[in-house]
Amino acid sequence: MATTQRPTASPRTDRERRSIGETAEGYVEALISQGVEYLFLNPGTDTFPVQEALSKFAAEGRPAPRTVLCLFEVVALAAAHGYYAATGRPQAVMVHVDVGTQNLGGMLHDAQRGRAAVVITAGRAPYTTDPDERGSRSSYIHWLQEQLDQHGIVRNYVKWEYELRRPDQVGEVVARAFQIAASDPPGPTYLTLPRELLMAEPGNVTLHRTEAYPPVRLGAGDPAALREVARRLVQAERPLVLTADTGRSPAGFHGLVRLAELLALPVIEWRNRVNFPSDHPLHLGYDPTEMVSDADLILVLDHDVPYIPTSVHPAPGATVVQIDVDPLKERIPLWSFPVHLPVRADTAQALPLLADFAEPLIDDDRSAAIEARRNDLSARHAYQRAAWHAAAQSDANTAPLTVSWVGHCIGALAKAQPDCLFVDELVTSNIEVWKQCPVTEPGTWYVSGGSGLGWGLGASLGIKLARPERQVVALVGDGSFVFGAPVAALWGMQQHNAPVMVVIFNNACYNATKRPLVASYPDGYSVGTDNFIGIDLLPAPRYDLLAAVVGAYGERVETPDQVLPALRRGLERTRAGQTAIIDVQLAHP
């Protein structure tokens, strides 16, 4: 198994003036200076100067980022996103001109909403026809690929965009791109590199290490505001915590555990990450509907959509407190959740301080109330888990397969194989699987944070590269599997020695479309005639047979007794270095 090796940065100071042969070499040197380990590449007629520079570095034995060739751009950006999610270290994606940028598709949305610090670079069609200018137009497509505003493709989704204008600026421009991407709140940036500039000879270039352009961090937030939050939490009778991304770092996970245990706070999560141990007595599941309207204080942590206002809303007089790296949700045009006390902060730093402020405020009366609440919540937790277990067991002999039973089998696998990491793109099946698959360790469950389908396969590749010592299990719907460019993604896993077990929840339909249609038109023509246009995927493709195309292992599962054995066989294959596809046939909704 290949190990992740971080290239050694060439400069020995924060910045260094160096003579560079071509700008493309300066670009590679700039990536090294920023600590980039992987360049996720889908090449074109404008990226070859960088490819030549990488070949030169290899021939001369110089350190360089490892190139991960991706056969489709969706895989490249999803993989870089996954790598960042698993490590917290921004990586680079390179695509070609306008068409490569467009092929990033929904993964750019996911990188934005998932706050993934990724630096995307794209070539730019040559702008000169001078035969004496290196890199000038030399092909029919060079006229077709120039757009009025190539950057307009991404401007809604990135934090910063720029076109390299002088070859000697490459060091500072790349450093700027990484600094902005990694600063709170993190997100993607976009840089275009004209071919003429890549092939120019700039002479001296200034290279900057991250110490010279460090990302800006929020810290713990306003201490006075946190003291007020602590006071209100201690006095609350029916507090509630709603979280989605607090577990993006171990410090956030452990900070929430400490605060919840101190004050007996019930936690309901949306499992973008493992935010709180799911077997903890204070973990009250994944549906806030029942508890939101009863709470007198709601603490919202790192959550873009804490509840659905058309289904439930806080009680009159309830206090809503929010601690978030982006409490205003500045890139969501209309965000209308009432918040009485917003705090802009990194929860990983704010939560321990909040616990420090709260602890001295707990007198004997509050201590008794907290213990009574702890006992009540523990009983609710036990009752809830017993009901979930009973639901799965009732489906143990049911065919076609149910999501609950498959989730139960995945949970059994997770308990028996604690080195597994899970990448989740289940869409309509996610909550049922969360119920059946307890996770207790931060950094073991990953969701994109957005709604662009096709993320799971590429993200699994990136996470496996980042965590080669762990087994990566991708849980995807059949629609998500197809959207993820499976031939490109599976080939990448095999080619780059990053085997993943892909479990397809195959219900042979677009259930995310079917559910709202049925809910909105229960007596409509679609339901009445059982004719759901543009929804059913019948007959379902044989996804297990696709495995052979790229040298992976494939298996189709149709009966309840074969789910767990098939998962075990698939994991044995990935441990041996071979990607596996387990195509699980669910009941058609």
Image (cartoon, rainbow, N blue to C red):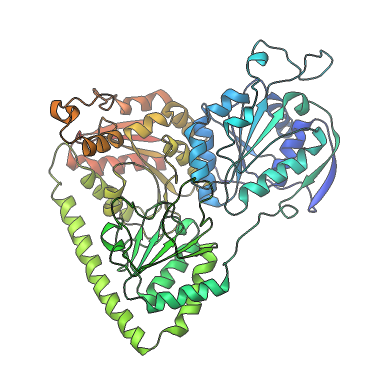
Q: Is residue 375 above or below residue 74?
A: below
Name the outermost residue toward the front: 316
Residue 531 lies in quadrant = top left
Could you say where residue 260 lies in the image, as x and y percent from the top left?
39, 71
Left or right: residue 17 versus residue 229 is right
Q: Is residue 420 visible?
A: yes
Report the quarter where the C terminus lies: top left
Q: Nearer the viewer, residue 341 or 544?
A: 341
Could you say where residue 89 lies in the image, as x and y percent from the top left?
59, 49
x 78%, y 53%: residue? 14
Left or right: residue 120 versus residue 205 is left
Q: Nearer the viewer, residue 399 or 264?
A: 264
Q: Is residue 254 above or below residue 274?
A: below
Residue 450 lies in quadrant = top left
Name the outermost residue toward the top: 140
Q: Is residue 306 above or below residue 145?
A: below
x 60%, y 31%: residue? 152
Q: Nearer the viewer, residue 302 or 311?
A: 311
x 30%, y 68%: residue? 281
Q: Is residue 515 above or below residue 49?
A: below
Could you say where residue 369 lies in the image, as x and y percent from the top left?
31, 82
Could you say where residue 215 lies in the image, as x and y percent from the top left?
66, 54
